[in-house]
Image (cartoon, helix red, strand yellow):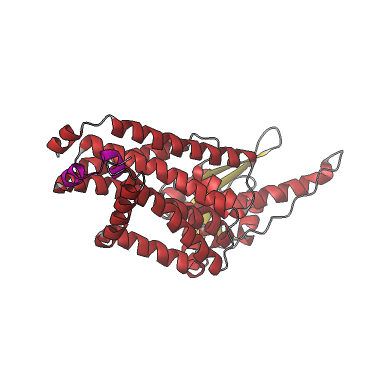
Amino acid sequence: MSRDGSPWGSRLTIAKRELATLKSEKTIVLALVIQLFVAAFSSFLVVGLVSLYDPGGAEGQTVTVGVSGEQRHDLAAIANQQEGVRPVVYDTGESARQAYRDHAVDAAMIANQRSDGRIQVETIAPDSGVESTLVVVSLQETLMEYERYERDQRSAHLDARPLGVPEVPSENPYYGFTYTVLVPLLVLLPVFISGSLAVDAVTEELERGTLELLAVAPVELREIVDGKLLAAAGLAPVQAALWLVLLSANGTPVANAPALLAVAGALSLAVVSMGIALALVTADRRQAQFLYSFGILTIAGVTTLLPEHPLNTIAKLAIGSPAETTWIAVAGYLCIGLAALVGVQFAVGRVDVDRLLGSA
């Protein structure tokens, strides 16, 4: 409670002050404008961006593949039926490998029959570079079709009739890009911006000496921190809600919007709390921003070890097919957000205001 007896008045006043100063932060404003543009014109942007997400959907690109081995003729016939693939037959495997090394072909496939009757296809493709993804996708489609062909050809020699070769399901790369890339981007990006905003809000107060003026006023440090946290953490779910509305207006329905906003709010609370704690510890803007960025990258790496990645959680919620693990993840994010809030409150209570102001 503040010294004037009002428990929330000073916090709300500081939060309004923080939001009012956002217009002077050109970087933050530019980030908001970019997000607004992406959300407002998502149906238009996805047409161009989907070729980067799914290179298999790009038209006019041809992958030249050197084909060799005992089964080269069947494999070449299958590859010739694939759109965007041009097979070149070589008599020996070494000649196909040499053609790849000489950059005469983009990839090489050497198909030989093993002693147990199975067909082994040695595939050589670039492991890096811009063309790598396109080549790998094209080879994957060719090998899958070749496998289907061989299964169908050998089914007549089996004692029991096997299951029929399943049809290739129709895929919509625009659908996949929208819900696995665009929606998570618009939900998580405001979270990261809010954390950076919180770091700047605290460190600038220390560097400019305005925190000292607030400290001598009838306002406690806890209330100052709460006001800044309220402004920064509350900004992310508000932005996410606006972006989801714009997506729906563009013909992209988003399911489980309340759960998505809860995830955005919980993660924002955790990230902003971390940013404020770093700002109070370092009292230096550059150092705090560096540690904040490093912390975000570390957290992003740790999330890959989770049973369900946050991006998958958001995508499943947006599509409308959440699993049990998805709801467990949502509950976990809420707990993390609340734990971070309690942690920063405890940390602020142990901060020596005089020492903090003296180090700024």
Q: Nearer the viewer, residue 121 or 165?
A: 165
Left or right, 91 with reference to 130: right
Q: Quadrant of the C terminus?
A: top left
Quarter occupied by the N terminus: top left
246 lies above or below 108: below
Q: Residue at x 17, y 42 (%)?
A: 216
Foreground of the two, 327 or 78: 327
Where residue 287 sits in the image (x, y, percent)?
Answer: 21, 40
**Closer to the camera, 147 or 310?**
310
Most common SS among magenta residues? helix
Closer-to-camera residue (68/357): 357
Q: Residue furthest front?
A: 5
Q: Is residue 321 left or right of residue 52?
A: right
Chain part drawn in magenta: 211-224
Q: Quick one: which residue is furthest to the left in this view? A: 358
* Residue 170 percent location from the top left of the image: 67, 59
State the count of labels: 0
Q: Residue at x 69, y 56 (%)?
A: 169
User: Can residue 105 be spotted in the picture?
Assistant: no
Examine the rendering and report whether any part of residue 26 can be seen.
yes
Residue 187: within the magenta? no
Image: 160 above or below 130: above
Give residue 223's position: percent from left, percent from top: 30, 42
Residue 23 appears at what percent x and percent y?
28, 62
